[in-house]
Each structure stands twice: as C-alpha cells, then as structure tokens.
Amino acid sequence: MERFGDEEGIGVVDETSFPKKGNKSAGVAKQYCGAMGKLENCQVSTVLSYVGRGNHVFLDRRLYLPEEEWTWDQDRRAEAMVPESVRFETKPEQAIIMFRHAREQGVPMCWVTGDEVYGDSPRLRETIQAAGRFYVLAVAANTRVWKELPAIQEPKEQTGGRPRRARRLAEGSPQSQMVSEIVAAWPRKMWQRLSVMEGEKGSITYDWACQPVVESRDQLPGPDIWLLARCSISTPDELAYYLCYAPPATALRVLIWMASSRYTVEQCIKEAKGETGLNEYEVRFWHSWHRHITLSMMAHAWLASIRAAEREKKARPARNSPN
C-alpha cells in the first residue's frame, strides 16, 4: 500500500493453473488448465492483483478446491491436510472474499475488472457496487439487459385468491435483450477506433462503443450501467462485451482503460512464473502450497518495487552540471 497504493487503483481478478501429474496435491483434478489451453490434471488458483501508480502486483490468492473431487472426500482432504473449515467456493465467491479482505485492510481500490468467469456473477457485481466501487467486467454474449428502464408493477392488496407479494414487469413492458443483440444493431458511427495499451509488436487497437443500459437481475431491472463492446479490426465477428458500473459522465476512454487493465494480471503471472518460481514447487499439503505461493508473490512485489524505483529515477530531470 505504501509503494503502490492509489486512490484510483484497480483490482483485477483472474486465475492461474499449475499442471500436475499425480493426484495427491491439494485441489488437483482434471479441469481446464489455462497454462496448457485444455482440460488437464492441474491445480487452479484464483488471484487478485492490483494496478496502481503505473505498476502491477499481486494482492491475494485462493486455491480452488473442485467440488466433485474434493469437497466430500474426507480421506483425500485429510491426506492433503485441507482444513475442515475449508468448503467449496466458486471462483467468483473466492473473488468476493479477496475483494472484501483487501477493503478491510484499507487497500485503496476504485475499480474492479475481470473476465467472463467473474463478470457473469451477479453477486460479485452487487458486492462491488454495494461497497461504493466501480467495475468493468466482461460478460457472456447472452447476458440480458434493457435499453431503457421498463415499467414495474409493485405488489398490492387484492381481494380473493393468493396475494401477490413480488414485484414484476408491468403488462406490455418490453422484454430484456441479449447484449449481443443490442450491439449488433449499433450503427457504424457509434464505434471509435482506439488504442490504450502497448503489446510486444506495438499498439493494440480495437473498435469500441458503449451505450447506457439497465441491468437485468432475476428478470427484473437492476442498476443503470454501461454496455461496452470491443470489436476486432481484422476479425469483425470477434466481439467482447462488458458491463460497466461507473459514474454517468465517465468517458469512453476510461472504460476502455479499465477493460484493458485486466491483462496486467497475466503479466503478473508470467513474471512470477518466470522470475520468482510461482509454479516451481513440489508440495502436496494445503498449507505448504499457500506458503510457497505467498513467498513467491512477496518476491514479485519486491522486484516490482525495484522496477518502479528505477522508472522514477529515469523520469527525474537531469541536474545541471556544476560550473
């Protein structure tokens, strides 16, 4: 917090995997392994990273415990020394726990971003909003929203029959639409070609557009949000969709920057695996895994602080030579 804390700081949720050959290590199972791009025997960790003052570092980590293979197998859990208090948590639930912990520790965090695994969780979005923070989260193409607030019929007393206690859409109100349907109807003039990040081969540029919409929660209107879309220039059919909870006057470029910041966590993971041994361990126990990963993340933060200091040193204006 001292070195990287930023009132406009961004929390980034993602996951990383560790391929394994055996079946004894805590949490190991055949599941999607991002490191290999397919279903493979591996461990998976949900991570929370942080972008502040132009730097990126890890904040937290939680080992994902697959429900079917680990939740009810008491012998396997005991052999891997998984504490009895540990229960199955979805990856979005793990993200919520880490986000809340960061807030309790006083980490200044204005924004949260992540991919569809996390953006498709209404509970995570609600948690961020309830904390007075903002989000730009990728969502699936079939996520439903309204272009305008539909009319709602409130519960009311009635004579005869069972009383209606729940809110519902008023008769004749439009149905929500998939975000892909809304974006497909956008005119070409809505799109802007912008670049906000640098890749290994230069600037990475996409076409971007956004529109205010109303989120659908439990088939009822939720908060007013932005629908942001990204379109590949070389492959126009390749689109990404984001729900953004942000102040009404937020500029498009700010939303784009938040969406693009998600890739800094991939940089954190790549650096830690290459420089601080994040994936170089041969431990089986629950506590042993956490010790190794924590020390690796601490080492990564130390290297990041050195890099930040060197950048600041180079950015200082050169002093005039003495006469």
Image (tube, grey):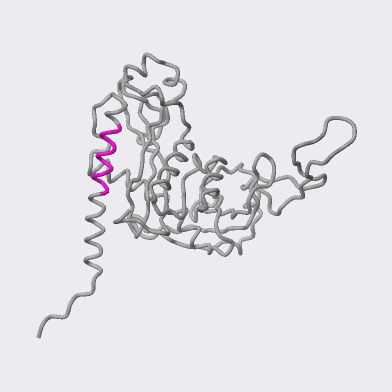
Outermost residue to the top? 75
Res. 84 image quadrant:
top left
The region drawn magenta spans 290-301
Residue 182 in the image, given as x and y percentages of width and height? 65, 51
Outermost residue to the bottom? 323
Residue 211 in the image, given as x and y percentages of width and height? 61, 58
Q: Is residue 220 above or below residue 229?
A: above
Outermost residue to the left? 323
Residue in the image at 62% along x and 48% along y: 179
Residue in the image at 30% along x and 20% along y: 22
Question: Which secondary structure class fits the magenta region best?
Answer: helix
Say whether residue 258 is magenta: no
Quarter of the image with the C terminus is bottom left
Say whether residue 292 is magenta: yes
Residue in the image at 39% along x and 44% along y: 48
Q: Is residue 266 left or right of residue 94?
A: left
Residue 72 in the image, given as x and y percentages of width and height? 45, 17
Residue in the image at 42% along x and 31% along y: 32
Res. 160 image quadrant:
top right
Q: Is residue 84 above or below residue 134?
A: above
